Image: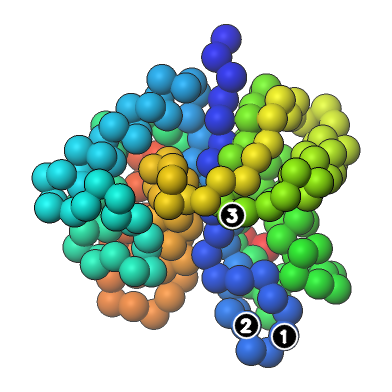
Amino acid sequence: MSRKTIFIDESGDAGITSCTSSRFIIAAVVVMSDNDAELISKRICEFRKLNGLSEHYEIKFSKTRKDIIKDLLRFVSCCDFQVYGIVVDKMKSNYKANSRYSLYNSALVELLKTIPHTSVKIIIDGEAGKNHQKAMASYLRQQLIGKMQIDGLKYVNSRSMDELQLADVVAGSINRYYSNQKDAGEYVEILKSKIVEIMQK
């Protein structure tokens, strides 16, 4: 059986002061094989060409025109992937986080627990040194004993990985759903056939 890959990105922030966002979202785009991941990347590359975007253009929910975001979601809908998400309402949540890192870690573990028991590699948007990556992998393995076998974890800048750009768009789409914007539900509606579970905490 092919090993799954989980691409992780977030929307909002994990800060716990009054100056931070009211919601924190982590999204997971799960693909069943390296071939599926490659097809997603090829599809996004093709989308850039068809829309006159530079091959180096980074598609981000917060910075890309929303009509392009919707078109991208439709364009990749033929690819095989699943969506999981967790939405933390920081005003109501039961998480007793004493730092932004403990909130992020707790939410990430909770999210990964919803993905069926399997062998996975995890790719997280961001940059981190080897020691931090090893520490995070060790932490997740301890928290997910009997739930998930983590065969690899690394941080990658989304600018260099199309699959992480899709995870960013998915996270932004989920965040938008809980906003008061007039198009709030349109992105999740496009994604509905891919969504397995979105938890609220």
Q: How many marks?
A: 3
User: x, y percentage for residue 141?
Assistant: 82, 35
Vertical arrangement, residue 89 with respect to residue 113, above or below: below
- Contact, CB < 8 Å: mark 2 with mark 3? no
> CB atoms at circles 2 and 1 under 8 Å apart?
yes
Label annotation for residue 126: 3
Nearer to us of marks 3 and 1 is: 3
Give the spatial CA distance, label 2 vs label 3: 19 Å
Q: Residue at x 25, y 47 (%)?
A: 55
Query: Label 2's element?
Result: loop
- Residue 17 is labelled as 1
**Residue under the point 68% across and 89% down:** 18
Q: At 69% across and 80% down in the image, what residue appears?
A: 91
Q: Position of residue 137 (x, y in %)?
A: 78, 39
Q: Secondary structure at mark 1?
A: loop
- The answer to which quarter of the image holds residue 28 is top right
- Disc nearest the viewer among 2 and 3: 3
Circle 1 Cα neighbour tier, 10 Å, few/some/many (<14 / 14–19 / ≥20): few
Q: Is residue 96 above or below residue 87?
A: below
Amino acid beneath label 3: Gly
**Left or right for 19, reference 142:** left
| Residue 100 image point, x, y percent | 75, 70
Q: Which residue is mark 2?
A: 20
Q: Is there any visible trace of residue 117 in the rendered image?
A: no
Residue sitting at the far top: 1
Q: Quadrant of the C terminus?
A: bottom right
The spot of residue 140 in percent (x, y) is 79, 41
